[in-house]
Amino acid sequence: MAGSVNKVILIGNLGRDPEVRTLPSGDRVVSFSLATTESWRDRNTGERKDRTEWHNISIFNENLGKIAEQYCRKGSKVYLEGQLQTREYTDKDGNQRKATDVVLQRFRGELTLLDSKGGRGEGDYDSGYGQSGGSFGRSSPMERGPVERRPAPAGKLSDELDDDIPF
């Protein structure tokens, strides 16, 4: 194989409201923490157990950053695709540290809001396209209402079009 892949897909809930910072270059970065929780039943006790992982998310994509800033709140459920990126920093005690973030780059990455209008209250929004949902104009056929079909007026372009398309 000639290349490699660095891709992360997560579905989880925001652990805090998105924070917006401006870099010295003038670019904006939106960051937040995302919790993913795995649940299972203990075989011996039958008790329900959970394990939560926390992920640091940084969005450098201007459009996705605006969506996160405007519509995401603590508790909002999101789907995102990004890349793992490790950075080094010095903590307040002068110790050298490393942190791994999920980064949505400037021209890569995806963010889909999974909360729906009328959901739990946090993260509710209206996409502005006459439907609620996080895909901003895209929804599954099951979420769409019935389409109203009107017959085309006689003598119009529809009479000239041939429905037998050769491909």
Image (tube, grey):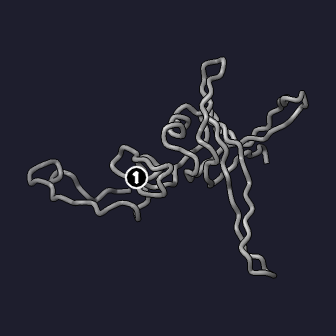
Q: Where is residue 28 shown, x and y percent of the image?
A: 60, 27
Q: Give above or below for 133 relative to 104.
A: below
Total numbered badges shown on the rendered structure: 1
Q: Where is residue 113 shown, x and y percent of the image?
A: 52, 50
Residue found 44% across the figure and 59% down from its top: 140
Q: Quadrant of residue 39?
A: bottom right
In the image shown, does 8 or 132 lie closer to the viewer? 132
Give the SS element for disc 1: loop
- Quadrant where the C terminus sits is bottom left
Q: Going by the image, does 16 lie left or right of 66?
A: right
In the image shown, does 31 or 136 lie closer to the viewer? 31
> Looking at numbered disc 1 in the image, what kind of residue is underneath it?
Ser
Residue found 77% across the figure and 76% down from its top: 42
Residue lying furthest front: 93
Q: Residues within 10 Å of mark 1 (few under 14, many from 20)?
A: many
Q: Going by the image, does 87 lie left or right of 11?
A: right
Q: Quadrant of residue 57?
A: top right
Residue found 34% across the figure and 57% down from its top: 166
Q: Where is residue 5 shown, x and y percent of the image?
A: 74, 46
Q: Where is residue 68 shown, x and y percent of the image?
A: 54, 40
Q: Going by the image, does 128 lie left or right of 151?
A: right
